[in-house]
Image: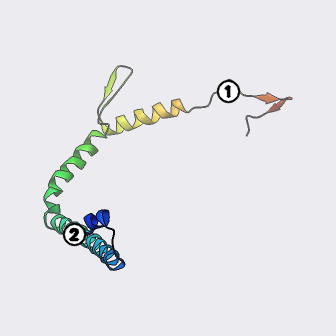
Amino acid sequence: MGLDAREKLVGLSNEDESRRLQLKGDIEQLASLEEISWRQKSRALFVKEGDNNTRFFHRLANSHRNANQIKRIEVDGVLYEDELDVRSQIVLFYQGLYKETEVGRHTMDGLDFSLY
């Protein structure tokens, strides 16, 4: 009869209770060792086979890099494909976007804040 079943029927002696605690500790230790073993096996497998995906990931990274490039741009109906023209059009766009205008300058009691 197992210790759990005996505990339900008649209870456990001090000796049986300490044996039960020891067995539970042994089971937990074995489970921990098994988990460590599986983790080590998975790392060994990755080291052995992990580089097999290198070509795939390099292709993926290169495709992302190509997708993130602006190779041509259309501004006011004109298509620019030369790299220098594309760069200059982008610079002009952002210069115009962030250009300050004199309209809307705030003054307070006759003080001009345009110099600050």
- Residue type, mark 2 in image: Glu
The residue to which callout 2 is attached is 34
**How far across and down, in percent of the image, does residue 10 sit?**
31, 67
**How far across and down, in percent of the image, does residue 30 sit?**
24, 72
Q: Nearer the viewer, residue 8 or 76?
A: 8
Q: Is residue 109 above or below residue 25?
A: above
In the picture, measured across the screen, residue 67 lies left or right of residue 55, that is right
Name the colour scheme: rainbow
Q: Is residue 80 above or below residue 21?
A: above
Q: Residue at the far top: name it.
A: 77
Q: Nearer the viewer, residue 74 or 21?
A: 21
The residue to which callout 1 is attached is 102
Residue 31: image quadrant is: bottom left
How many marks do you count on the picture? 2
**How far across and down, in percent of the image, does residue 63 sit?**
22, 44
**How far across and down, in percent of the image, does residue 22 sit?**
31, 77
Residue at the (16%, 62%) spot, across then down: 51
Q: For mark 2, give the secondary structure.
A: helix
Quarter of the C terminus within the rendering: top right
Q: Nearer the viewer, mark 1 or mark 2?
A: 2
In the picture, measured across the screen, residue 84 lies left or right of residue 101, that is left
Residue 66: image quadrant is: top left
Q: Residues within 10 Å of mark 1 (few under 14, many from 20)?
A: few
Task: Tell me how far mark 1 sits from mark 2, CA to CA.
Answer: 73 Å
Q: For mark 1, give the secondary structure.
A: loop
Q: Residues within 10 Å of mark 2 (few under 14, many from 20)?
A: few
Sequence order check: which comes first, mark 1 or mark 2? 2
Q: Nearer the viewer, residue 33 or 9?
A: 9
Residue at the (28%, 65%) spot, across then down: 4
Q: Is residue 86 above or below residue 11?
A: above
